[in-house]
Image (cartoon, coloured by chain):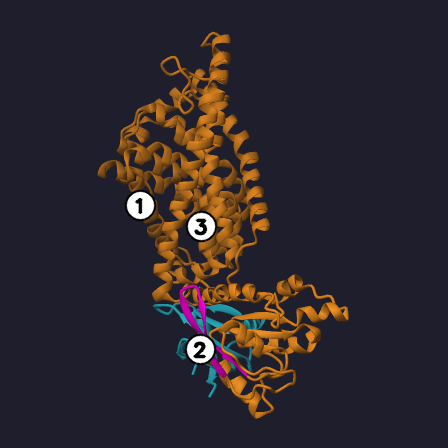
Chain colours: A cyan, B orange
Amino acid sequence: MDLTQLEEGESGVVVDIQGGYGLVRRLESLGIRVGKKVTKVSSQFMRGPITVRIDNSQVALGFGMARKIIIRVAK
Amino acid sequence: MGNPNVGKSVIFSRLTGVNVIASNYPGTTVEYTRGYMRLGNEKVEVIDVPGTYSLSPTSKAEKVAVEMLKQGDLVIDVVDATNLERNLNLTLQLLKDGKPVVVALNLWDEIRHIGILIDAEKLQEILGIPIVPTCAITGEGIKKLVSEIPFAKANERLEDVSIKSVTGIPLALVSLYVVFNIIRFIGEGLIGIIFEPIFENLWAPLIMRLSDFLGNQGFIHDILIGKLVEGKISFVESLGLLTTGLFVPLAMVLPYVFAFYLILSFLEDSGYLPRLAVLVDNVMHRFGLHGLAIIPMMLGLGCNVPGAMATRVLETRRERFISATLMAIAVPCMAQIAMIFGLIGKYGAQGLAAVFGTLLVVWIVLGVLLNRLSKGESPEIFVEIPPYRLPYVGALLKKLWMRTRWFLREAIPYVLFGVFIINVLYSLGIIQFIGRLSAPVITGILGLPQDAVGALIIGFLRKDVAVGMLLPLGLNLSQLVVASVVLTMYFPCVATFAVLIKELGTKDMLKSTLIMISSALIIGGLLNLIL
């Protein structure tokens, strides 16, 4: 599943980023990379941006970007 | 939570009054204990857990602690001040877990005996969480610790609700309403209590004496003091350098600018703006922008110049063009807003609603149009959301002072120059001449008297002075609304224009200018027909 399908408050681990080198690097600069635990903080109506928590920071990212981040839900 | 044998249980007892056995060896507590304490009017549950060195448990007791962590809304991390480095390891892990943390730097009395110095404030700064030195045995610091708990909790709750659509949007609207009223309250208060009395009671008699000395008329009198209204000085209508030239920037505009920047600086430092950007992201995408473009718009409400510079945070040239054009057309600066308040406010709220409502509609419609008409797509928002912080008063005041000083330095010379130019142009008959030339547009389309062209000319220099110039024309309410809207839209003031050329380049600025002039005429004409 991807980041947009995660429920609010649910956590998961990033397993893949389905994008080019540019996207991967951009996400990495704000701490989103494969192997990282992310917790969804909020989503907005009508495919609005997704906010996630990684470590001790929060990042908001567009719906399209979030869809390229593949997540495995932590059990 | 905390390492074993740091005094967690003693602090627990202090907080809840529940007696638990505490002794001086690691592992005294192997089970958790629940207790309750009062926090204001609320009863909150406090859980004492076994000590652990890390969140990866190695023993049963540690496992209990890590399991309990999930239940908590807030963690009080008890740290042994005499063993800071090892203890902070757990603190860092707790921070990574994401729950709000308050650190009790316990055994504070001990470190003095063994000669350790800890800069608790510095540590607080580095970790970004409240750190309270305590001595649980004597009770020192416990009160302070309690006072930090609701703060950290409230912070966290706000952080969550302010970024979710369901709660965040109403919260944003309420904040907007509150902010607007605070600005008006401070602005009107400063004017009524300080600035008007100073001008009316101290400055007016002085100027009146000067006027008598100059014989109440003549060229120099008109430049310095302007025309007397019924034998008296009218600070708004006289249009002299020493009367209107000082009164407009200082007593009508400065109080609102001050109030606006006070609130804006607070919002900037609190961490709210990026959350607002997330909430409005959807709307901004209709304009071909993304949420962050709300920041130049907000800054533009203070002054269009910093607003235009702030478009640099946007990634593409297309976004910068759309946001700069939208801001220059539909976002009036505080100086102009203050003058519109002064001019139209006395007719009640509906005149103001007509002006700002029209501008809002223009902002939306033009945004959608620009998005359709310009090639390309809008990139997605990608921004870090900082934690909420209570702004540091010193830094806030410094920023406020810098911005206010910048306003005074930029505004006063331009206002004085503007007032001077009006007087010269009037006495040479140039304004009357242009008025006759432009009568088909000014009177025909906009329904304004020919003299209003003077305000449009001065609007290139300073929009606040231009709005002030409408007063002596004796316009009715609908004419005032038309004139205020057109003055906002038709062209940016010279300072903004200069920055926009630099930011957009000459070609895009030319496009932008054409859009401004034509949309001002269309909207002004429509308003004239409707009102």
Q: Magenta region: which residues?
A: B33-49
Q: Which residue is drawn at 40% across and 34% down?
A: B339
Q: Name the residue under label 2.
A: A3
- Residue B426 visible within the image: yes
Q: What element carries label 1?
A: helix
Report x, y in % for residue B446: 29, 33
Q: The disc numbered 2 marks a residue on which chain? A: A
The numbered mark at residue B297 is: 3
Q: Nearer the viewer, residue B475 or B242?
A: B242
Q: Identify residue type, mark 3.
A: Met
Q: The disc numbered 3 marks a residue on which chain? A: B
Pick whichever of labels 3 and 1 is earlier in the sequence: 3
Share a chain, discs 3 and 1? yes
Asked whether the residues under the numbered discs 3 and 2 touch, taking CB atoms below 8 Å apart as contact, a structural biologist would say: no
In this rendering, the answer to whether B223 lies above or below B521 is above
The numbered mark at residue B357 is: 1
Q: Which of B405 and B175 is in front in this view?
A: B175
Q: Identify residue type, mark 1.
A: Gly
Report x, y in % for residue B207: 49, 16
Magenta span contains residue B11: no
Quarter of the image containing the N terminus of chain B?
Answer: bottom right
Report x, y in % for residue A16: 51, 82
- Residue A13 visible within the image: no
Q: Examine the residues drawn in magenta and state their main secondary structure.
A: strand
